[in-house]
C-alpha cells in the first residue's frame, strides 16, 4: 500500500499541466485519501487493538501535556515579539495566541494570523505584528527540523535538516521576510478588508541584524513539549520498545514540520499522519501506528478547544467579577 503511495508522490506531471482547484486542494485530497485508505486496509487490525485502564490515563496525560504545550507555544511567540523590540503594547499576547489558535482549523488556514494582526496591529503597528506572525512558523519549522538528527544518520537526512537554520541569518532572513510581508499583507487585505484601515507597513523585514537565538531556543522547548503528548499516545498502545525515543522524536518532528509547511488541510490534517506512516511503517506495525496518529490528532484538537474555551471563560469570569465589584459602589451612591 505504502509503495503505491510513494510512487504517486514521485510521479512527474507533463509541463504546463495545472491542477483544477489548486495544488492545495489536491494535496489535501491526496493525503486524506491516503489516510482513509490506510484505515480501510487495517480496519481489522485497528479493531483488535484495545486501550487498558492505564492507557486511558496516558491519554488524559497526553491531553494535559498538549494543552501545556500551547502555553509554551504562546510564550515562545511572546519571546519572539520581545526580541523584535516592539513590545506588546496593551495587548496580552498569551490569551490572544490561545484564543486565536483554534481559528487555524477554518478553511484558508490564515484566520489565526488575521486575528493576531488585527488585535496586535493597533498597539505595535501592522508591520511588526505581521513580522511576528510570519517569523513564528519559520522558527517552528527550523526548531522541529533540528530535532530530526536525533534519529540517527537516516541516509543523510541528519545532515540536511539543520540547513534551514541558515535561513534565519540576517542576509537571507530579511529579504525573505520582506517578500513574505508583501504577499501576506495582500492576502490578509483580501480576506479581511478591515485590515486596510490599520496603519501602513512602517518597514519591511524585522529590522534586526542578529540571529534570533533566544526565540529559536523557545521554539525548541515548544517542540519538545509538543512531542511529550505524542509520546504519551505511543505509551497507550505499548509501542515504546519498538524504536528508541530519538527515532520517535525524529519522525514526529519531521511529520510535524511537513504538516506546517505543506499547503494542505488546515492544522496539517492528513499531512502529519501521512508523513508519519510513510516514515515509520517499515519499523512499526501499521495498525498500532495509525491508532497512535489518530489518538494524537484527537488529543491536540481537544487541547486547542480547551485552551480557547479557557481564555473565553476567564474573560467572562473577569467581567462578572468586575460587575460585582462595581455593584456595591453603585448601590451606595444611589442611597446617598
Image (tube, grey):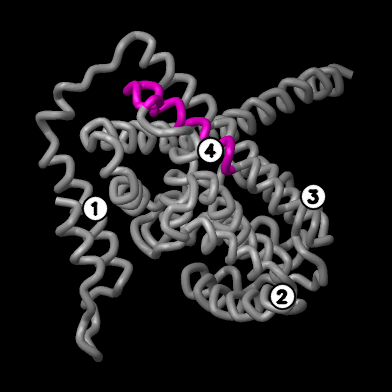
Q: Which residue sits at x=22%, y=86%?
A: 17
Q: Residue 8 carries which label?
A: none
Q: In which quarter of the image is residue 159?
A: bottom right
How much space separates mark 2 and mark 3, taking CA atoms? 23 Å
Q: Is mark 1 on a helix, strand or loop?
A: helix
- Left-right relation of 207 to 57: right
Q: Give the range drawn in magenta.
A: 223-241
Q: Is residue 83 above or below residue 273?
A: below
Mark carried by residue 90? 3
Query: Is 36 placed left or right of 191 in the picture?
Result: left
User: Does the magenta stretch mainly form a helix, a strand or a loop?
Assistant: helix
| Residue 227 belongs to magenta span | yes
What residue is shown with label 1? 32
Which numbered disc flags the more N-terminal residue, 2 or 3? 3
What residue is disc 4 on? 226
Marks 4 & 1, CB-CB < 8 Å contact: no
Query: Which label sits on residue 205?
Result: 2
Amino acid at each position: 500500500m505504502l509503495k503505491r503511495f510513494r510512487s504517486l508522490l514521485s510521479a512527474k506531471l507533463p509541463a504546463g499541466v495545472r491542477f483544477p482547484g489548486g495544488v492545495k486542494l489536491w494535496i489535501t485530497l491526496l493525503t486524506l485519501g491516503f489516510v482513509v485508505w490506510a484505515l480501510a486496509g487495517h480496519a481489522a487490525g485497528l479493531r483488535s487493538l484495545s486501550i487498558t485502564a492505564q492507557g486511558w490515563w496516558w491519554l488524559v496525560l497526553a491531553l494535559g501535556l498538549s494543552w501545556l504545550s500551547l502555553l509554551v507555544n504562546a510564550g515562545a511567540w511572546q519571546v519572539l515579539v520581545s526580541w523584535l523590540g516592539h513590545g506588546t503594547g496593551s495587548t496580552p499576547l498569551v490569551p490572544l495566541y490561545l484564543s486565536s489558535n483554534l481559528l487555524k482549523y477554518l478553511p484558508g488556514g490564515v484566520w489565526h494570523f488575521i486575528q493576531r494582526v488585527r488585535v496586535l496591529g493597533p498597539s505595535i503597528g501592522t508591520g511588526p505584528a505581521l513580522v511576528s506572525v510570519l517569523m513564528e512558523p519559520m522558527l517552528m519549522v527550523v526548531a522541529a527540523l533540528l530535532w530530526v538528527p536525533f534519529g540517527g544518520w537516516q541516509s543523510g537526512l541528519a545532515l540536511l535538516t539543520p540547513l534551514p537554520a541558515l535561513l534565519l541569518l540576517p542576509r537571507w532572513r530579511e529579504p525573505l521576510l520582506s517578500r513574505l510581508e508583501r504577499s501576506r499583507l495582500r492576502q490578509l487585505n483580501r480576506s479581511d478588508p478591515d485590515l486596510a484601515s490599520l496603519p501602513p507597513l512602517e518597514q519591511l523585514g524585522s529590522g534586526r541584524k542578529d540571529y534570533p537565538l533566544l526565540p529559536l531556543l523557545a521554539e525548541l522547548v515548544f517542540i519538545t513539549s509538543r512531542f511529550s503528548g505524542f509520546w504519551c499516545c505511543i505509551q497507550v498502545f505499548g509501542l515504546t520498545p519498538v524504536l528508541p525515543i530519538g527515532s520517535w522524536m525524529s519522525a514526529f518532528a519531521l511529520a510535524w514540520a511537513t504538516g506546517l509547511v505543506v499547503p494542505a488541510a488546515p492544522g496539517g490534517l492528513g499531512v502529519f499522519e501521512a508523513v508519519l506512516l510513510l516514515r515509520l511503517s517499515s519499523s512499526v506495525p501499521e495498525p498500532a501506528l495509525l491508532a497512535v496518529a489518530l489518538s494524537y490528532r484527537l488529543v491536540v484538537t481537544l487541547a486547542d478547544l480547551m485552551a480557547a474555551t479557557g481564555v473565553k471563560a476567564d474573560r467572562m469570569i473577569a467581567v462578572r467579577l468586575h460587575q460585582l465589584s462595581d455593584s456595591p459602589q453603585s448601590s451606595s451612591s444611589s442611597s446617598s
